[in-house]
Image (cartoon, grey):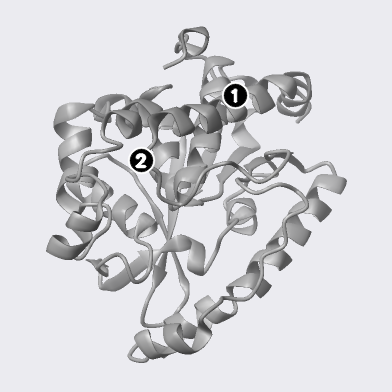
Amino acid sequence: MNASHSPLAVSPCAPPCAAHLGLVLEGGAMRGMFTCGVIDVLMQEGVVFHSIVGVSAGAAFGCNYKSHQPGRALRYNQRFARNRRYCSLHSLITTGNLFNAEFAYHTVPMRYDPFDAATFDADPTQFHLVATDVESGQAVYHRLQRFDDEALEWIRASCSMPLVSKVVSLDGYRLLDGGIADSIPLQYLEGQGCRRNIVVLTQPRTYTKRPLSLQPLLRLLLRRRPRLWEAMQQRHVMYNAQLEYVRARETAGAVLVISPDGPLPIRHVCHDAAQMQQVYDMGRRKAEQLLGDIRQFVGGQ
């Protein structure tokens, strides 16, 4: 990690305004390195949230907020960037998962870069994530009350991209990537009582999602899951409507948006540690530029 961005101590004290403050973390696979930079700055500033909701990479990386581990998500992704046990065509061919289900979601957080489950469990922040039920095409919301093997499976479900991941079966659901059904779950968190929310996006403000390409092929591949196909086909409509809602809530003073200034220079899958660092640093710089606005927003509830 860049020495100038070494982790700082996280304040254990929640400000009085934390009762109704929420954090919404969009997904975007390795675009989530931008999110990692943002939330590490927020952690180091001691910003405490009542509730956090993460989608896909937003869940996988955002859970480190509740465990008070700035720098961790960048560190393990860089360490295993070229390890075929972590994310590779070899893993996809041999296991059916591009990101290896056992190694990436269990072995790494338990053995190689331990997740602080005790701190996660003790911290009062509510941590929620979103997955998509492949049978109904609807969003499934789940609160991680304690960090264990089942929690890791929920995170895997939220991150499981269609066509390159196996369906994850949990609590009677068959689940894939949460971003299919609810990409920016601001309205969900508002329904949990968070009246003011910081929303971290991994696309610039000018972004507009377009319809899926290769629709006939995807429809054929997903022919046994028509509801999932319908959700994927309409995802751009859902996503663009959610962006409009975020903007409306921002205009009303109920939301503070942190997003990149332009398209991030990274693909969904990345094996380049330097590129990860670059995007992480972009997230840090953006959060640092907005520190005055963040402090005012957090303190103005």
User: What residue is shown with label 2?
Assistant: 271
Residue 249 position, x and y percent, is 79, 51
Q: Quadrant of residue 120?
A: top left
Task: Using residue 153 as the reference point, say whether residue 158 is left or right of it.
Answer: right
Residue in the image at 26% along x and 39% along y: 147
Residue type indicated by callout 2 = His
> CA–CA distance between discs 2 and 1?
21 Å
Above or below: residue 256 compared with residue 291: below
Q: Quadrant of the N terminus?
A: top left
Secondary structure state at the residue bearing disc 2: loop
Task: Using residue 238 as the reference point, say whether residue 82 is left or right of it.
Answer: left
Residue 272 position, x and y percent, is 39, 35
| Residue situated in front as seen by the camera: 145 or 104 | 104
Residue type indicated by callout 1 = Arg
In the picture, the disc for residue 284 is 1
Considering every residue shown, the one lying at the far right of the view is: 251
Secondary structure state at the residue bearing disc 1: helix
Residue 206 position, x and y percent, is 78, 52
Above or below: residue 293 compared with residue 246: above
Residue 34 is at least partly visible in this image:
yes
Task: Using residue 33 as the reference point, say whether residue 282 is left or right of it.
Answer: right
Residue 123 is at least partly visible in this image:
no
Residue in the image at 55% along x and 49% along y: 26
N-terminal-most mark, 2 or 1: 2
